[in-house]
Image: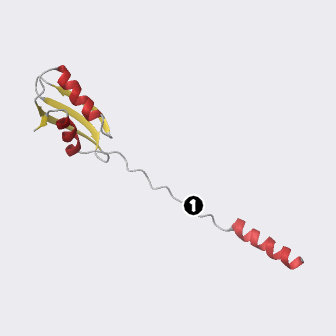
Amino acid sequence: MKRILFIAFISIVFTACSPKQHTVDKAKTPPVMVEMKLKVEGMTCTECEQSVAKGVNELAGIDSISANHLDSTAFVRFDSTKTNLKEIAAAIAKRGYEVK
């Protein structure tokens, strides 16, 4: 009986004193913010600007968007680790406008 208690005690001590294996959380990729000026064809009014902005804002990683129908431009600030120019252009095209 003493042997069993001794073995149990030693097992507990070694288990408790063994170095813990910590899992290291993979560091999140830091955002890479990109600002772009896009030429957007087909906008004729403020509702067009709002439509472009709404479509782009549905994408992940968009920080800001400002469209202007007077000079047919859109300024977009986005996290390039979450979205890209191709996805932004597709979101604008889905609204009926074309990125040049």
Horizontal side of 69 relative to 60 (left or right) equals left
Residue 71 in the image, given as x and y percentages of width and height: 10, 26
Which picture quadrant has residue 60? top left
Q: Height in image: 22 above or below 89?
A: below
Q: Height in image: 30 above or below 15?
A: above
Name the residue at 80% across, 71% down.
9
Q: Which residue was labeled with disc 1? A: 22
Residue 86 in the image, given as x and y percentages of width and height: 20, 45
Q: Height in image: 82 above or below 26?
A: above
Label 1 secondary element: loop
Name the residue at 19% across, 36% down.
94
Q: How many marks?
A: 1
Horizontal side of 49 relative to 22 (left or right) equals left
Horizontal side of 14 relative to 51 (left or right) equals right
Which picture quadrant has residue 52? top left
Farthest residue to the bottom: give it: 3
Residue type (three-letter) at the residue carrying disc 1: His
Name the residue at 62% across, 63% down.
20
Residue 54 in the image, given as x and y percentages of width and height: 27, 29
The quadrant of the image that shows the N terminus is: bottom right
Residue sitting nearer the eye, 32 or 47? 47
Farthest residue to the top: give it: 46
Farthest residue to the right: give it: 1
Which picture quadrant has residue 14? bottom right
